[in-house]
Image (tube, rainbow, N blue to C red):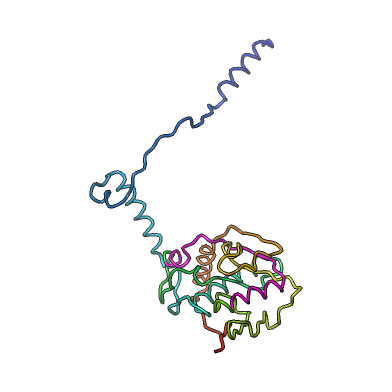
């Protein structure tokens, strides 16, 4: 076989082995509003499409994944639900930070529904944690952590992990400890919180002084779903307690 024939065969093989490359050159569509007008004059195809997704979503949202020992609400200075969420957040930090977490911090109205007593579904957790807030790790000096607790005193408390003991009197911090120790102004504390709070929202302006910030991109809702599922695998109910982590003196 001569050289020229070899090149011809090579050219044929290369042509047949090349896959066509496609790219979008134009897109067209229209918006169909599903409102009261849609109810009176429904689009059959859209109605079937929405119904198919709704049926699938409802079946997934209504799957029980755990059992709550009690009805859990959210309020100040502490509550069953804010305590539970803050403790799970700290536990997540303990598992994912090299030296563990010092504190879990959660805002009261990051919860949008109560946790029912009895079966708990994925839908329940979507209702409770309806925002797509993500878990964020902060390194915060003790002097700034004290400012955070000053804010807690002014607003009457919020979610905090159980290793904190905070006493408030006349909207001021009377005493506060972390792991039974007073706050060291120069120590760097590892905080587990939400991206929303890390941005200084909801009276958490002290977090703007963080030495470092790491947004994990993992939503609080996903963390709570996984935690409930793990409790169920271990044969545990979902439990929380009012334990005096925040006390307001009259």
Is 15 included in the stretch rendered in magenta? no
**Magenta segment includes 147:** yes
Residue projecting furthest to the right: 186
Q: Is residue 120 left or right of residue 152?
A: left
Corner quadrant of residue 112: bottom left
Q: Residue 110: give x, y in percent of width and height.
A: 50, 68
Coordinates of residue 140 in the picture (x, y in percent): 69, 68
| Along the line of sight, the residue nearer the viewer: 10 or 135 | 135
Occupied quadrant, residue 151: bottom right
Q: Residue furthest front?
A: 170
Q: Is residue 134 above or below residue 28?
A: below
- The front one of 52 and 249 is 249
Image quarter hosting the C terminus: bottom right
Image label count? 0
Q: Residue 232, how many percent across, how many down?
A: 49, 71
Q: Which residues are magenta?
A: 124-152
At horizontal 71% and vertical 82% (from top left) the residue drawn is 182
User: Which residue is pictured at 59% across the width and 71% down the height?
Assistant: 105
- Residue 16 location, quadrant: top right
Q: Is residue 47 above or below residue 250?
A: above
* Viewport quadrant of the N terminus: top right
Name the outermost residue toward the left: 40
Q: Position of residue 36 (x, y in %)?
A: 27, 52
In the rendered structure, the answer to whether residue 21 lies left or right of residue 29 reads right
The answer to whether 91 is drawn above or below residue 52 in the figure is below
């Amino acid at each position: 076989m001569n050289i020229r024939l070899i090149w011809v065969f090579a050219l044929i093989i290369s042509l047949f082995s090349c896959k066509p490359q496609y790219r979008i050159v134009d897109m067209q569509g229209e918006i169909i509003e599903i409102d009261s007008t849609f109810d009176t004059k429904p689009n059959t195809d859209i109605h079937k499409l929405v119904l198919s997704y709704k049926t699938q979503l409802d079946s997934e949202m209504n799957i029980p994944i755990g059992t709550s020992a009690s009805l859990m609400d959210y309020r100040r200075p502490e509550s069953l639900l804010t305590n539970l969420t803050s403790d799970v957040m700290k536990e997540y930090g303990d598992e994912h930070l090299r030296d563990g977490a010092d504190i879990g911090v959660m805002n009261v109205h990051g919860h949008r529904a109560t946790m029912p007593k009895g079966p708990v579904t994925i839908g329940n957790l979507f209702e409770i944690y309806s925002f797509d807030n993500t878990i964020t790790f902060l390194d915060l000096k003790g002097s700034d952590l004290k400012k955070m607790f000053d804010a807690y005193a002014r607003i009457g408390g919020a979610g905090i992990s159980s290793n904190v003991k905070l006493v408030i009197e006349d909207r001021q911090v009377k005493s506060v400890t972390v792991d039974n120790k007073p706050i060291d102004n120069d120590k760097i504390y590892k905080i587990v919180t939400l991206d929303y709070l890390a941005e200084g929202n909801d009276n958490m302006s002290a977090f703007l002084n963080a030495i470092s910030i790491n947004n994990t991109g993992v939503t609080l809702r996903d963390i709570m779903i996984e935690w409930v599922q793990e409790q169920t695998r271990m044969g545990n109910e979902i439990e929380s307690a009012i334990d005096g982590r925040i006390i307001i003196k009259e």
